[in-house]
Amino acid sequence: MRRVAVVGIGHTFFGNLSEFDLVDVLAFASGNALDDAGILAERKIIEQVIVANIGGGILSHQTGIASSLVSRMDMEPAMAELVENGPASGASAVKLGFMAVASGMVDTVMVTGGELMRTVTGWEATDFVATLLHPEAEYNLGLTLPAFGGMFTRMYMERYGVTERELAMVAVKDHDNAAKNPFAHVQIPVTLDAIHDNENANVVNNFVAEPLRLYGMCPVTDGAATVILCAADSPKMKYFTKRPPVYITGIGSATDTHCVHNRKDPLVLDAVRLAAERAYAMAKLTPADISFAELHDAFVILELAISEEVGLFPRGKSREAVVAGVTRLEGRMPINTSGGLKAKGHPTGATGVSQVFELVKQLRGGAAKENRQVKDPKHGLAVNFGGFGNNVVATICSKEPTW
Amino acid sequence: MVDFSMYEEAVPSVFAYKCPTCGTLYHPVPMVCRKCNARRDPSGVIYSAWEKVPLEGRCRLLTWTRVWNLPEGYDVKYLLFGIAEFENGLRASGRLLVDDPETGMSLYAKAGVVKKKGDKELYGLMLDRTP
């Protein structure tokens, strides 16, 4: 298998981009990545374009999006395909790009993930995401992803004793990080007093899906992100001298039952654990080697549960890490340095690519100018969580190759 | 006989499906039995059609939520949902009709109207205190 380097990254602002065309949003992130890689003028060296998007057909009434992006960017005759894998689409697209390069089929791939979700009402966006549930046994009942987030949160709180205050501490940490990230959707710091401790906190932090509150959930967000991959042994690496390469050293994915109720223990996220184990095995690393992580906190409880499932903390103990500040930027294991889905936002098709963008940015040392740089990171882990844990992709990026 | 039941929307029942080979119950129905690998054939032509068993009776509430932010098409203030486990170990998600639920409480599962699609009514699993 060939080594795969990330040689360019691009990002749009996350927020309300509903005045723009979906392909323009994808193209903006793509252009930023081509600029970052220093190959805007030589962009035809990209052989394969992979686009991650879920709702183009439903929300933007647009199909054939990958071909459209290639044309918008004047990158013909690059091969182009669309990847749809629910909220894990972005990382799946990165994984398929990695496979294309590692296998030797191509040398260069551009992966762009993006979504426009604010073109419709919040009710319609919630319904759109809920279509990934089982149609008969879940969706028809009126169940949504926040509903599963609420039920998962209650089970987790009852089993491990996590409190609402500890969940609010995760949100405060994510908002602190997002406030320093110029691409984040909600760049507003919040205090524990405002969203939990104050007797009037309910006014700004009411229930959405009990016991989950507004500040326990990600916003509805538009945006796009791009990574450019190149085979480390390719002569085309001569084009990528503008930035130091970062390496994808491990990538793995796994699936679990479509219906949450069919899992032996609904609190055990088998797909998360297996995806991470596969990524660690490829990278020849263990959880102890990870310097920081971007974890799919569409609901803040998932930051805790995923961090335990991938081995960063023992099961039921991540709450102690949160209270001790271990997961803060300056802590021993910074989590969601970008602000996470919670505050950076979750444009579904973009999220997995945006997580890898953040890993690369931190490993390059590029977050220092935003005053949110992790100290001397060597390996970053991203977990992109599809459905309610039924399709998960874990990616490890490293400053130096590990194999 | 061809089984078109999956296309019927207004059936006043919710079903579990029984593997004809090993008897394992499923909800929702898979295409292959997880335990014995027996295949299901919706047409009943090549393999056996699986027996439909009404999904109802005593169950225990494993977890629940009250959702205040509902998707398009629900004209109510909030809805409650739960995951329940039947006495035989089968689990299902359902609409919770108890306004003050507690994890672990005993419930009764039955079919009820969950949604209207045009002039048709869709049935789903309801979880209530009584039959």
Image: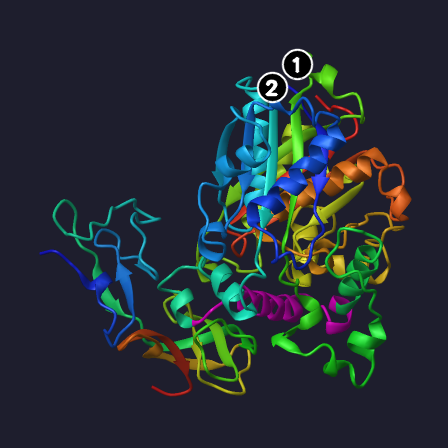
Residue on which the image places disc 2: A107
- Contact, CB < 8 Å: mark 2 with mark 1? yes
Gap in angstroms between the C-alphas marked 2 and 1: 6 Å
Q: Position of residue A276 (x, y in %)?
A: 63, 41
Residue at (42%, 81%) from the top-left corner?
A: B107
Which mark sits nearer the N-terminus, 2 or 1?
A: 2
Eyeballing the image, is B52 above or below A375?
below
What is the chain letter for disc 2?
A
Residue at the spot 55% in from the left edge and 81% down from the top edge:
B102
| A207 in relation to A356, above or below | below
Magenta stretch, residue numbers = A142-167
Q: Quadrant of the N terminus of chain A?
A: top right
- Residue A235 visible? The answer is yes
What residue is shown with label 1?
Answer: A234
Identify residue type, mark 2: Asp
Q: Is residue A7 magenta?
A: no
**Which residue is drawn at the image coordinates 45% and 51% (left, top)?**
A57
Measured from the top left, where is residue A205 in percent x and y? 72, 76
Q: Secondary structure at mark 1?
A: loop
At horizontal 45% and vertical 55% (from top left) the residue drawn is: A58
Q: Residues within 10 Å of mark 1 (few under 14, many from 20)?
A: some
Where is residue B44 shown, x and y percent of the image? 14, 52
Q: Is the magenta region chiefly helix, strand or loop? A: helix
Q: Is residue B1 above or below residue A88?
A: below
